[in-house]
Amino acid sequence: MRGGYPEVVMRALLGVLMLVGWMNAAAAADMQVEVSFPADFSAAPDGKGDVALKVEDARDDDQLGKSADGEPLQPTQDLAKSLYDLIAADLKQAGFNVVSYAPGSPQGLIIRIDSLKYSENRNMFKTRAEVKCALVVDMASVDTTYTFRSSVSDEYAWKPTADKRGALIGKALAGALQAAFDEPDIDEALGVSQ
């Protein structure tokens, strides 16, 4: 009997080794997450005039956090640019004219993503996901630096999809922006009368 039993065992062992290698490679790969913001986001107060806007990602690492399986989550887009686009659209909708930022702009607004942490905790068949973030806001006409924090969480059956992870991250960032635009000093610096 040519090959016989040992050949079958060798093929099965090779198959198992290939499967384990594939699983390890898949687990080590970064999960790509597209951060999406609430469609109905509206935080800027009604106003007029120019706002020189700049958004920066001041974090040391662009990783968003990790899944319950330990997979690193990476954004598919430039997070600072996406946040800039959201804020600029909101300011324009509120009546402002968004212009390029230049140091010394009278209504210069710098928003920095200071921290952003996504985490998951699996308990049996449910996963609790939480996002904590902090935005730092500097206004050219005000000597104070403001920090606004937001924390959101949700539970999912087994685990959230990449889309749900991205939406939760966007919701946290939008919450911190809402807090920033609710600050009377920032409204005043934008030229909005209370």
Image (cartoon, helix red, strand yellow):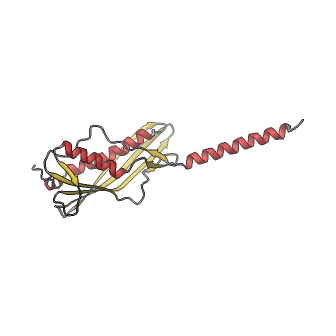
User: Outermost residue, right direction?
Assistant: 1
User: As rendered, which of 89 and 117 lies closer to the eye?
Assistant: 89
x 85%, y 37%: residue? 4
Quick check: 43 left or right of 66? left
Using the rendered view, name the quadrant where residue 139 is placed. bottom left
- Across and down, in percent, residue 194 comes to 10, 49
- Across and down, in percent, residue 152 comes to 35, 45
- Across and down, in percent, residue 143 comes to 19, 64
User: As rendered, which of 119 and 84 lies closer to the eye?
Assistant: 84
Using the rendered view, name the quadrant where residue 141 is placed. bottom left
- Across and down, in percent, residue 12 comes to 74, 39
Quick check: 57 left or right of 30? left
User: As rendered, which of 158 and 60 lies closer to the eye?
Assistant: 60
x 37%, y 41%: residue? 167
Quick check: 118 left or right of 22? left
Q: Is residue 173 above or below residue 144?
A: above
> Looking at the image, how many numbered discs can be counted on the residues?
0
x 27%, y 37%: residue? 40
x 59%, y 48%: residue? 25
- The N terminus lies in quadrant: top right
